[in-house]
Image (tube, rainbow, N blue to C red):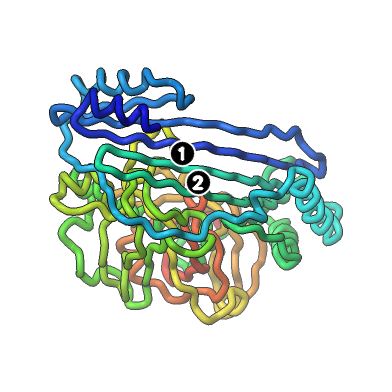
């Protein structure tokens, strides 16, 4: 990379090189049968050059491909005008690499996945079951012309359990991810099988406003809309409803959310972002008050502020080395409450528990709107789950919904939006618009 950096100095005023090596071992059992294992071991590097105030960007799949520098330099002539300075700040180490996980073999991963499958079968052998597990090991390196030269290694273990209907459609699912080795506890299997059994009674539910409990996986789709509001690119484009509202009370008193990229073993934990800016913990919402926006280098410069260490090569449907950095959060945390989910359910005369949705990416996301088809939802009546709600939608706007939160469960799980974005509890909203088909 040092040779490439020297070429960058010859071709432009400033620049950076980001290199990423990724190793993956995916294991899956579908209907109890082990599927083909397709291991991956990939390498990629990305070069950004700034010359005469214009940006050039190019990628390569080999560290020996020096032509990537010339490609980036050529693009500079027609590239976007930019003003940004590449960083060279001190970096704090973060716990995100587990030797035990890095040494885990394919054989051991298969054995653990099979153990979980056997547990599911022991609870109810009539339920078609899928189990998947994946090990990831990444090495991120970054150097720039300012003098930064940093790297870190990261592991991840992702486990997903699901059950199928007699017609082969997904019925229930549960997943967990960590950068440290873990084993799937039996209670997860018990909860999954119970929900599958509860869902065998299909129900058309009434249309109207009713209490809705959003599971962490689905509450993540609402939080994604909040992230769009605090995204520096949307703020600069003038399409965020949160522009100019820092330090204003916008949500209910109980609503708190913070970012913790240094959380030990968090799925998005990292010492610096994909531009080399140190990451740091920050409050986003404190007692209902908006506290922070998220910026990468480019958007921060345009806004006349500093990067918040949130420049990442991600996207709604995936990112990677070929993506340009953009504002994104690492390990969003919503604190849990004190009441178990079962007790929250038992207190409801009527309601809906939503565990999975479709159409999470649709609607005017920066404006906070959501209109979601309920993929896995369970109708609650007189404090008990009655069955699975079919042909049901929930809709609203987070800037109204998040002013009405009534309760948080003591249990937590992964906040998700096409993949994990953080950690949080089940969240009870006392009044949400629900569209169903009355019996």
Are there few (<14), some (14-19), or many (20+) residues within 10 Å of tag 2? some
Along the polypeptide, which appears first: circle 1 or circle 2? 1
Q: Horizontal placement of 395 versus 340: left or right?
A: left
In this view of the protein, which residue sits in the foreground, 330 or 419? 330
Under circle 1, the secondary element is loop
Residue 180 vs 164, above or below: the answer is below
Residue 371 vs 315, above or below: the answer is below
In this view of the protein, which residue sits in the foreground, 181 or 344? 181
- Residue drawn at x 43%, y 36% as measured from the top left: 19
Q: Horizontal placement of 139 versus 239: left or right?
A: right
- Residue drawn at x 55%, y 31% as measured from the top left: 42
Residue 82 position, x and y percent, is 17, 35
Quadrant where the C terminus is found in the figure: bottom right
Residue 90 position, x and y percent, is 32, 56
Q: Horizontal placement of 420 versus 369: left or right?
A: right
Residue 139 vs 36, above or below: the answer is below
Q: Horizontal placement of 141 versus 88: left or right?
A: right
- Residue drawn at x 66%, y 51% as measured from the top left: 160
The image quarter in which residue 8 lies: top left
Under circle 2, the secondary element is loop
User: In the rendered structure, are the residues bearing label 1 and label 2 in contact, judged by CB atoms less than 8 Å apart?
Assistant: yes
In this view of the protein, which residue sits in the foreground, 2 or 415? 2
Q: Could you say which disc has been placed on residue 418 in the image?
A: 2
In this view of the protein, which residue sits in the foreground, 169 or 48? 48
The residue wearing badge 1 is 317
Are there few (<14), some (14-19), or many (20+) residues within 10 Å of tag 1? few
Residue 145 position, x and y percent, is 26, 37
Work out whether residue 127 can be spotted.
no
Work out whether residue 426 can be spotted.
yes
Residue 283 position, x and y percent, is 32, 67
- Cα–Cα span, label 1 and label 2: 7 Å
């Amino acid at each position: 990379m040092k040779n490439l950096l020297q070429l960058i100095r010859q071709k432009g005023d400033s620049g950076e090189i980001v290199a990423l090596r990724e190793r993956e071992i995916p294991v899956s059992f579908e209907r109890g049968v082990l599927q083909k294992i397709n291991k991956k071991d990939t390498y990629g590097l990305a070069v950004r050059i700034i010359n005469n105030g214009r940006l050039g960007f190019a990628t390569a799949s080999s560290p020996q491909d020096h032509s990537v520098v010339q490609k980036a330099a050529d693009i500079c002539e027609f590239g976007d005008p930019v003003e940004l300075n590449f960083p060279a700040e001190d970096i704090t180490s973060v716990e995100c690499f587990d030797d035990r996980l890095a040494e885990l073999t394919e054989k051991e991963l298969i054995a653990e996945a099979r153990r979980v499958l056997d547990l599911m079968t022991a609870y109810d052998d009539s339920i078609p079951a899928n189990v998947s597990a994946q090990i990831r090991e990444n090495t991120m390196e970054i150097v720039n012309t300012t003098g930064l030269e940093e790297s870190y290694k990261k592991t991840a273990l992702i486990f997903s359990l699901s059950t199928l209907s007699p017609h082969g459609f997904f019925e229930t699912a549960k997943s967990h991810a960590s950068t440290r080795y873990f084993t799937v506890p039996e209670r997860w299997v018990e909860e999954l099988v119970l929900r599958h059994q509860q869902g065998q009674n299909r129900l058309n539910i009434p249309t109207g406003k009713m209490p809705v409990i959003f599971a962490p996986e689905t509450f993540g789709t609402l939080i994604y809309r909040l992230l769009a509001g605090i995204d520096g690119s949307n703020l600069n484009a003038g399409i965020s409803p949160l522009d100019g509202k820092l330090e204003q009370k916008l949500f209910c008193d109980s609503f708190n959310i913070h970012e913790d990229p240094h959380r030990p073993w968090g799925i998005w934990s990292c010492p610096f972002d994909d531009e080399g800016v140190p990451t740091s913990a920050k409050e986003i919402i404190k007692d209902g008050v908006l506290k922070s926006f998220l910026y990468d280098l480019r958007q921060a410069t345009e806004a006349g502020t500093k990067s918040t260490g949130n420049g990442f090569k991600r996207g709604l449907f995936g990112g990677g080395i070929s993506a340009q950095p953009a504002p994104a959060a690492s390990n969003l945390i919503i604190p849990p409450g004190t009441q178990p989910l079962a007790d929250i359910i038992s207190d409801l005369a009527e309601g809906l528990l939503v565990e999975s949705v479709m159409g999470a990416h649709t609607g005017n996301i920066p404006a906070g709107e959501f209109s979601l088809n309920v993929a896995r939802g369970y109708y609650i009546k007189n404090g008990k789950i009655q069955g699975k709600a079919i042909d049901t939608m929930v809709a609203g706007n987070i800037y109204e919904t998040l002013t009405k939160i009534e309760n948080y469960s003591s249990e937590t799980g992964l906040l998700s939006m096409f993949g994990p974005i953080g950690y949080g509890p089940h969240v009870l909203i006392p009044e949400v618009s629900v569209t169903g088909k009355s019996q």
